[in-house]
């Protein structure tokens, strides 16, 4: 089954998050570096102002080994880390797991 990584950006008083930059530029860097590392897809969900989170990014990998392989500086991770200050000063809540069941209707 697929392996999923998530990055949830919490609403933070005084925090900065540029959704346009994130979706247009940062996620393009994700695709550029990780498409050959087992990246299957990604999506960004934005939430209404005033809620507990600003955005949630879901990244689908072929498997856990693919995600692990991508998380090293030479596979684009360093460029992604260096890009963070360009769109946010908020530390995301990150978690990951293997898909246990799925259905497409």
Image (spheres, rainbow, N blue to C red):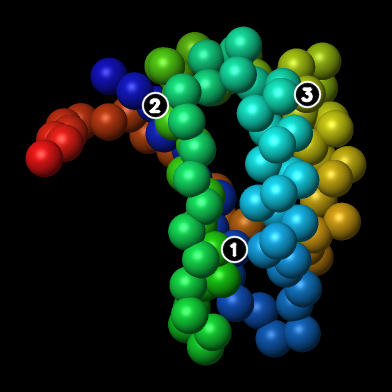
Answer yes or no: is residue 26 visible. Answer: yes
Between 13 and 105, the one lying in front of the other is 105
| Residue 46 image point, x, y percent | 51, 66
Q: CA distance from mark 2 to mark 1?
A: 20 Å
Q: CA distance from mark 3 to mark 2?
A: 19 Å
Judging from the image, what secondary structure is the residue with disc 1 in?
A: strand
| Residue 20 image point, x, y percent | 70, 61
Question: Residue at left 81%, top 40%?
Answer: 81
| Residue 13 image point, x, y percent | 69, 86
Q: CA distance from mark 3 to mark 1?
A: 21 Å
Judging from the image, what secondary structure is the residue with disc 2 in?
A: strand
Answer yes or no: is residue 90 visible. Answer: no
| Residue 64 image point, x, y percent | 45, 19
- The label shown at residue 3 is 2
- Judged left or right of residue 78, residue 7 is left
- The label shown at residue 23 is none
Kindly indicate the quadrant of the structure image that contains residue 55: bottom right
- Crowding at mark 1 (Cα within 10 Å: few <14, some 14-19, many 20+): many
Judging from the image, what secondary structure is the residue with disc 3 in?
A: loop
Question: Residue at left 78%, top 24%?
Answer: 76
Q: Which residue is mark 3?
A: 76
Q: Which residue is mark 1?
A: 9
Of the two numbered discs 3 and 1 on the same chain, state the one appearing first in sequence. 1
- Crowding at mark 3 (Cα within 10 Å: few <14, some 14-19, many 20+): some
- Judged left or right of residue 101, residue 89 is right
Question: Residue at left 52%, top 52%?
Answer: 44
52 up-or-down from 80: above or below:
below
| Quadrant of the drawing holding the N terminus | top left
Of the two numbered discs 3 and 2 on the same chain, state the one appearing first in sequence. 2
- Judged left or right of residue 39, residue 26 is right
| Quadrant of the drawing holding the C terminus | top left
């Amino acid at each position: 089954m697929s392996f999923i990584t998530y990055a949830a950006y919490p609403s933070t008083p005084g925090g900065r998050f540029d959704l346009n930059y994130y979706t247009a530029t940062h996620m393009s860097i994700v695709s550029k570096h990780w498409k050959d590392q087992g990246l299957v897809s990604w999506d960004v969900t934005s939430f209404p102002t005033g809620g507990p989170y600003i955005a949630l990014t879901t990244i689908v990998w072929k498997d856990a080994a693919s995600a692990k392989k991508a998380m090293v500086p030479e596979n684009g991770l360093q460029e992604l880390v260096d890009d963070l200050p360009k769109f946010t000063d908020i530390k995301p809540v990150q978690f990951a797991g293997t898909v246990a069941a799925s259905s497409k209707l």
